[in-house]
Image (cartoon, helix red, strand yellow):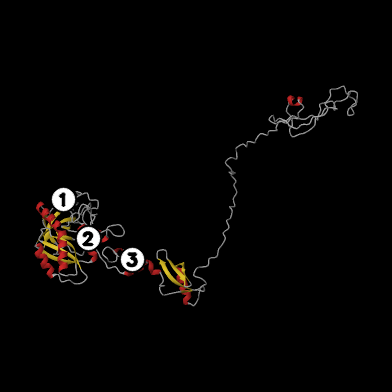
Amino acid sequence: MGCSGCSTGRGCSTASTGLPGGCKNNGSCGAGGCNKLNVFDWLANMELPSGQPICDIVEIRFKNSRKGFYRNVNNLQLNVGDVIAVEATGGHDIGVISISGELVRLQMKKRNIKADSEEIKKVYRKAKQGDIEKWQEAQGLEQATMYRARTCAVKLNLQMKISDVEYQGDRTKAIFYYTAEDRVDFRDLIKVLADEFKVRIEMRQIGARQEAGRLGAIGSCGRELCCSTWLTDFRSVSTSAARYQQLSLNPLKLAGQCGKLKCCLNFELDSYMDALQDFPEVNNVKLETEKGRAFHQKTDIFRRTMFFSYTHEPDNFIPLPVDRVKEIMEMNKNSVKPEDLLIKVVSTRIIEKNPDYENVVGQDSLTRFDKSKKPKSKNKKRNGPPNPNKQAAGVNPNPNATKQVTNPNQNKPNPNKPNPNNPSKTNNNRPRPNNNRPRPNNNTNAKPPQNLEIKNPE
């Protein structure tokens, strides 16, 4: 399809601008050029060995995918993108150089064309301004000529479709490309077209794939058609290519823009054929088991998995590896039926063994050297000084105790009574403190009990 700047697909004149091959984008075409079947010259920066002659043949591109090889007999300085006039039947034609240099030899070898062949025509000269203007006028007449030719073919009841028209560069000849299913007698059509357009008429029949390649389109993959960008070898595509790749035989999905099977079905066919060599033939074979008979449903080629189902459970797909299918088929040949399609797997419990080494370094914790901070006890100082305020009021400092207050003179020693523990000492000594005196509580926030019973001394 080329770029949006040129609808003819031939390429535009660069004689006035001096820019390389391009179009209305002035040589900066984002698609690599406004022509189809572009070729990257990867030998452009390589020098020839000493004494090796330079190839004097160039490849010329015309409208759409038509190309030809021409010999530079005048030793002109030709570069890729130059518009030149070449030899044609009964005149000259205008084209654009697509390849020059040593890459032309490889292209000729690919197309089985010998360098000394007499079919290779000559390069006349670089196109002049008058040649380019006349060539552009011929391009402008191609669309209207095609519509007029279709009308003439319908009036003559010819079963053919004229898909494209190409004028020669000197505007003395027109080539009509058509497609037809059967042989067509177009002798009357040639007379009508010659009288209508006053040029020599040439009719060329092409196939549906060549037609799609000349017109160009966008495929279902979202990219430009392969036949209009790089594909030149149109091979026949059969439905067996779709069967080998496990594709559904849906003609709406498998057909391309030309109405034929897509050419891309042949691209990966060899890989599928190599992968299927190790698979058993199970199309008409059924696996016999004690659980029942199983038949083949589908195959995942690259995962090497085949799906089977029992006849009494057709909705249950059982995946089997290829080796297991071969094993069951071999057992059935020996009149042996396995218990089930799947392999019985005995579950084993794995016991993890603890390591037999000890941590001799002692790196148990990162905080092993930190000092532990113990919380301070609130009742650490139990024998503190008594609270005189609470003792004067006769309130028990310990709120948990409910001891009654007695006569303070009850336990007071009698000086006239002897001491039975130490008779040598008199009772005139200083009396000992009362050990039954309640101890003070250090908890200053403690509240005294509300219901405290006080008795008067006797």
Residue 297 appears anywhere in the view: yes
Mark 3: secondary structure: helix
**Any mark on residue 215, and which?**
2
Residue 100 appears anywhere in the view: no
Task: Identify the residue at image location x=38%, y=69%.
Answer: 277
Task: Identify the residue at image location x=16%, y=50%.
Answer: 14
Mark 2: secondary structure: helix
Across and down, in percent, residue 377 comes to 68, 34
- Three-letter amino acid code at the position of disc 1: Thr
Kindly identify which residue carries mark 3. Answer: 269
- Three-letter amino acid code at the position of disc 3: Leu
**Any mark on residue 14, and which?**
1
- Three-letter amino acid code at the position of disc 2: Leu
First reached walking from the N terminus: tag 3 or tag 1? 1
Across and down, in percent, residue 137 comes to 12, 55
First reached walking from the N terminus: tag 3 or tag 2? 2
On the rendered image, what quadrant is the N terminus found in?
bottom left
Task: Identify the residue at image location x=43%, y=67%.
Answer: 306
Quick check: 236 above or below 456? Answer: below
* Total tally of numbered discs in the picture: 3
Is 258 on the left or on the right of 198, as rendered? right
Q: Quadrant of residue 375?
A: top right
Mark 1: secondary structure: loop
Is 108 on the left or on the right of 90, as rendered? right
Q: Is disc 3 in contact with disc 2, using a CB cutoff of under 8 Å?
A: no
Is 378 on the left or on the right of 19, as rendered? right
